[in-house]
Amino acid sequence: MDFLAHILLEKTPQTLQGQCHSFHWQWLGEGLLSFTPNTSYKKSVVFSAGIHGNETAPIELLVQICQDIFAGLLPLNVRLLLVLGNPRAIRQGVRYIENDMNRMFYGKHLQYENLAETQRAQELEVVVKQFFEHTDVSISRYHYDLHTAIRRSLFQTFALLPYQKKIYDQILIESLAAAEIEALVYHREVGSTFTSFTSAICDAASVTLELGAAKPLGQNDLTQFTDIDSILRLLLSAGALPSRKKSPVHIFKVKSTIIKRDDDFRLNLSADAPNFSSFQQGELIASQRSGNDIAEKNQIRILFPNIHVKNGLRAGLILEEVERK
Ligand SMILES: [Zn+2]
C-alpha cells in the first residue's frame, strides 16, 4: 500500500481492505487507512499529518511507518488510524487552498463557506469518531497530530495540548518527554484544532506536535525527526518508552491571545522573529488604535505571531513559563 502515491495520483486502491501479517487493514477514504491487530490490544491510536498540505516531513514519516507496517518490519500491537488530512493541499504543496483546516474542527466549520476543506474537516471528524467508538472505553485513545511550523523557533520541537477539563494523560506526557520535545504549551481555552475535537468529543489523549520547519516533499532531512519517529513506532509496537536524554521540558501556559482588531495593527517584532521570542515587563508587544498589548512580566513569550490575519482573528499567543520538570 503506497499511501502517499494514491493521494498524489488521486487514485483509489483496487483493493480496499485485506489481511496482512497479523492485522486487518481497511482503506476508509482518501488519506484514511485503519489497521486492526488480530490479537487483543489496549490502545486505539490516531496519527495524522498533512492537515496543512505543505508540512511534508510528518507526511513522509507516516508514509514510511505505513510501508514498514505492511512490510512486516514494524509490529502492530495497537489499533491504528493513519490520516493524511488535506489531500488537495498536499497535491499542490500548499498549506491550504481556501481556508486553514486546523481552525475548522469542533463545530467551527459552520462558520466557514461549505467548500472542499470544510467538507474534509467534517469527514475527518466523522471517520475519527467512528474509529474511536468502535472500541469500548477500556481501550485508551490517543491522537498525535503532526505539523511543522511556518517560522523558526527558539525551541525546535514543541507540543500543544488542547484545553480540557480531564487530567492530561500521563503516558501521552511521558511519550513527549521521551521524544525529546523541547517545550509543552497548554491551551487555556477551547480551540478549533483537530486535537481539540478528538480530546473533547472522542475522549482521546491528544496533542499537536510542531516538529521543525516546512519544506517541499522529498527535501526533508528525516534524520532530524528520529526521536519522534522512534517514539511513534514504540507506541505502535507497545514497547517501553526510553528515558529522556535532553534537559527537562519547558512548560508554558497560554496567558492570553493577541487579537488583531484594527487595520493599523503592528507587532513589536521583526518579520522573521522566531516562535517563543520574549518580551520583558513593560515592553510593547502589539499596538493598534483600540489599545496596546504590553508585557505584564519578564520573559513573556510569543507563539505563532502573524500580522497577516483578518481583523477579529488571532495574531499570536502570549505564553508564560510555569515550571520545568
Ligand atoms: Zn501545521
Image: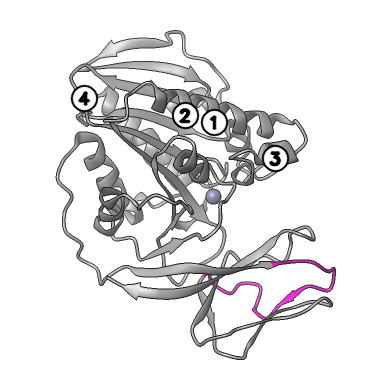
Mark 4 or 2, closer to the camera: 2
Amino acid under label 3? Ile
Estimate the spatial distance between the alpha carbons at disc 4 and disc 2, rounded to whole Å. 25 Å
Confirm or deny contact between disc 2 and disc 1 (CB under 8 A): yes
Q: Is residue 319 at least partly visible in the picture?
A: yes
Q: How many numbered marks, from 0 up? A: 4
Residue 255's place in the image compared with 138, above or below, is below
Residue under the point 53% across and 23% down? 30
Residue 107 image-quadrant placement = top right
Residue 49's place in the image compared with 290, above or below, is above
- Report helix, strand or loop for mark 3: loop
Mark 2 or 3, closer to the camera: 2
* Residue 109: image location, x then y, percent: 68, 37
* Residue 305: image location, x then y, percent: 62, 67
Amino acid under label 4? Gly
- In the rendered structure, which disc, 4 or 1, sits on the residue that comes first in sequence? 4
Q: Which residue is mark 1?
A: 125
Confirm or deny contact between disc 2 and disc 3 (CB under 8 A): no
Q: Which residues are magenta?
A: 259-275
Residue 204's place in the image compared with 298, above or below, is above
Q: Which residue is mark 3?
A: 97
Residue under the point 47% across and 29% down? 128
Indicate which disc residue 248 carries.
Answer: none
Main SS of residues in magenta: loop
Q: Which residue is mark 4?
A: 72
Mark 4 or 1, closer to the camera: 1
* Residue 66: image location, x then y, percent: 34, 30
Estimate the spatial distance between the alpha carbons at disc 3 and disc 4, rounded to whole Å. 36 Å
Q: Which residue is mark 2?
A: 128
Residue 101 horizontal side relative to residue 276, left or right: right
- In the rendered structure, which disc, 2 or 3, sits on the residue that comes first in sequence? 3
Estimate the spatial distance between the alpha carbons at disc 4 and disc 1, rounded to whole Å. 30 Å
